[in-house]
Image: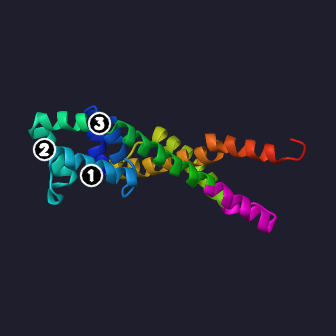
Amino acid sequence: MDWKDLGTQLLNKGLPLLGGLLGGPVGAVGAKAAVSLVSSALGLNAQDTTPDKILERIEADPQALIDLKKAEMAHKERLQTLVLEEKELELKDVADARARERAIVEATGKRDVNLYILAWTVVGGFFGLCAVLTLVPIPGGSDKIVYLLFGGLVAGFSQVLGYFFGSSKSSSDKTKLLALPGK
């Protein structure tokens, strides 16, 4: 089990803030704070602060889950702030990608064709694999690999859609409109 799995377990047990932070990027400030809070609430030492040991403790002792809920409620404002900070970092990452694209256009006078080739490859691969999975039976024993590839394509497809059509895209478009002369 990893931290993301533990985050999912905590979400399922009614701990949305702790679960969401632990399920986020490993090494992020929010995840570190959540691990620290969970460890402190359960009275665990450094050696026992692993996803498996934390889950064992929660499942073995009903009071542990109550202690975690109390800790989450006591630190709710700080945890929510950490969740917002992680979302801001994700949006900043998307904005940086768009700024990179703008800088390439300004420097070369043309768009980065590789970006569009990669985007169309992911979109085509997604729909192609959807068609294949619908029309062709998967040979026994290889279904896990096919579904793993499909999961990767779904994630890539989501990122392509988010980049080209996400809310930060419309924000970027508004910024361009406001920068036009006479606006």
Q: Look at mark 3 in the image and give the residue it sits on.
A: 74
- From which residue to which does the magenta span run? 96-114
Which of the two discs, 3 and 1, sits closer to the camera?
A: 3
Q: Residue at x 81, y 48 (%)?
A: 179
Q: Mark 3 or mark 1: name the one nearer the start of the chain.
A: 1
- CA separation in Å, label 2 and label 3: 21 Å
Mark number, residue 75 = none
Q: Are marks 2 and 1 in contact (CB under 8 Å)?
A: no
Q: Residues within 10 Å of mark 1 (few under 14, many from 20)?
A: some
Residue 98 placement: quadrant: bottom right
Vertical arrangement, residue 25 with respect to residue 167, above or below: below
In the image, taking residue 134 as reference, residue 73 lies left or right, namely left
Amino acid carrying label 3: it is Ala
Q: Look at mark 1 in the image and give the residue it sits on.
A: 36
Q: Mark 2 or mark 3: name the one nearer the start of the chain.
A: 2
> Residue 3 in the image: x percent, y percent?
29, 51
> Residue 131 in the image: x percent, y percent?
52, 41
- CA separation in Å, label 3 and label 1: 14 Å
The answer to whether residue 142 is visible is no
Q: How many circles with numbers are drawn on the protein? A: 3
Q: Residue at x 47, y 43 (%)?
A: 84
Mark number, residue 57 = 2
Residue furthest to the bottom: 108
